[in-house]
Image (spheres, rainbow, N blue to C red):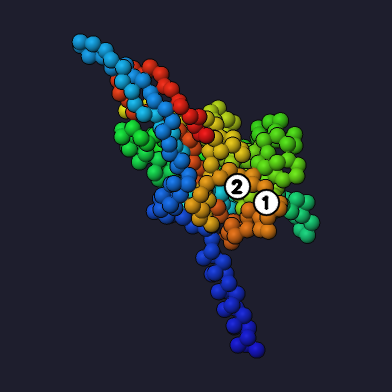
């Protein structure tokens, strides 16, 4: 009998180790490798027009031209995870995890009645009765992609556009945005937070993953990968806009002295012309798409094969840029022969 008990204990321990080993974890080299593997599918580089420049010397002035190109840049790595400070991106967890946890603990401990230790995967209700079984909370971070700054260094060539993002820069850390991300203040006052059908990720009412508003860590969604995708969309929605009632740094500005850049606008759900997503973990994808896919008629849903044992998910956010190399002192105008993004 003791042998069987011991075997049972060992089996349980092995199962726990196996489950932990399945938790989504990404490294900087891994992010770069997966991004490069999706370059042809997600970058979508193409010549889109021509730019005209005025170049003057001591003797005369002339008009010069440069090729205008368009392509998507991997601007952000967006991680959605359970435990505060436990970003699945190893480098970020090691450098920012403890600081984020300490800062959020101080703020929450003095202002908000939200327990830190149970932050991951909390559901509403208590005891045997769960009032909202699918209401789940997750932390979300948006960090500058490791290749973002490299694109800036390559911009002088003229055929690669400089990104608005800076590599490894924390644009959004939900632990520092505790009041809005946890308590829905003042997000609850947006009309889209209480009017069904506004800002839906999907098609309301028959097929929707969830609403962009309120832009908090709380989601009501039976499928875990879709709930995480809603969190990622909300973080992207915040950082690509200025003046939002959150603690964050907006993605603004682009273009050095070596080129003229037309950066992307705010991220809009279901609109590939504003941004597309590439899953890095737990299921690495070599292609990009928007969230909100209608999977009602498929044999397996969008979340099939994408569930992480620890509830951690990571995406690249690719956004469209247009640019041309500087050929004179003054930019005159540009002509597009095709619309970009198409």
In the rendered image, is residue 75 in sight? no
On the image, the x and y values in percent for residue 155 come to 34, 34
Image point (69%, 50%), residue name: 221
The image shows residue 81, relative to residue 108, as above or below, that is: below
Q: Which mark is residue 239?
A: none
Q: Residue at 51%, 49% (x, y): give it.
A: 287
The image's mark for residue 229 is 2
- In the rendered image of this protein, does residue 200 appear above or below residue 336? below
**Quarter of the image where the N terminus is located:** bottom right
Q: Nearer the viewer, residue 246 or 230?
A: 230
**Which numbered disc, 2 or 1, marks the residue closer to the eye?**
1
Q: Which residue is mark 1?
A: 295
Name the residue rendered at 53%, 38% in the picture: 275
Percent position (x, y) of residue 292? 64, 44
How far, Cα to Cα, is label 2 from label 1? Answer: 15 Å
Q: Are marks 2 and 1 in contact (CB under 8 Å)?
A: no
Query: Considering only order in the chain, which callout, 1 or 2, is on the residue closer to the N terminus?
Result: 2
Question: Seen from this angle, which residue lies furthest front?
Answer: 337
Q: Position of residue 248 (x, y in %)?
A: 52, 35
Give the total of numbered labels.
Answer: 2
Mark 2 residue element: helix
Residue 75 or residue 17, whichever sits in front: 75
The local secondary structure at tag 1 comes to loop
Q: Is residue 313 visible to us here?
A: yes
Q: Residue at x 72, y 45 (%)?
A: 207
């Amino acid at each position: 009998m003791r042998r069987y008990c011991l075997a049972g204990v060992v089996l349980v321990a092995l199962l726990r180790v196996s489950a932990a080993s399945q938790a989504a974890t990404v490294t900087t080299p891994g992010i770069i490798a997966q991004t490069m593997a999706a370059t042809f599918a997600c970058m979508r580089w193409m010549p889109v027009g021509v730019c005209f420049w005025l170049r003057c010397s001591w003797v005369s002035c002339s008009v010069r031209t440069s090729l205008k190109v368009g392509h998507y840049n991997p601007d952000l790595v967006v991680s959605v995870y359970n435990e505060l400070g436990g970003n699945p991106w190893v480098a970020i967890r090691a450098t920012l995890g403890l600081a984020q946890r300490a800062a959020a603990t101080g703020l929450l401990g003095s202002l908000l009645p939200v327990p830190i230790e149970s932050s991951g995967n909390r559901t509403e209700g208590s005891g045997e009765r769960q009032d909202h079984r699918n209401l789940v909370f997750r932390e979300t971070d948006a960090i500058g992609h490791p290749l973002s700054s490299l694109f800036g260094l390559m911009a002088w060539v003229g055929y690669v556009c400089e990104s608005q993002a800076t590599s490894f820069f924390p644009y959004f850390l939900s632990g520092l945005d505790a009041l809005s991300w946890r308590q829905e203040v003042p997000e609850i006052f947006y009309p889209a937070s209480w009017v069904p059908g506004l800002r839906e990720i999907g098609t309301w009412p028959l097929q929707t993953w969830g609403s962009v508003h309120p832009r908090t860590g709380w989601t009501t969604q039976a499928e875990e990968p879709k709930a995480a995708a809603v969190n990622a969309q909300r973080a992207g929605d915040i950082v690509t806009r200025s003046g939002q009632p959150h603690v964050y740094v907006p993605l603004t500005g682009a273009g050095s002295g070596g080129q003229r850049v037309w950066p992307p606008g705010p991220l809009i759900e279901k609109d590939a012309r504003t941004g597309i997503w590439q899953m890095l973990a737990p299921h690495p994808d070599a292609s990009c798409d928007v969230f909100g896919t209608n999977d009602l008629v498929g044999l397996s849903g969008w979340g099939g094969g994408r569930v992480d044992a620890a509830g951690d998910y990571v995406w690249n956010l690719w956004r469209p840029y247009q640019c041309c190399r500087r050929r004179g002192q003054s930019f005159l105008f540009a002509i597009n022969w095709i619309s970009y993004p198409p």
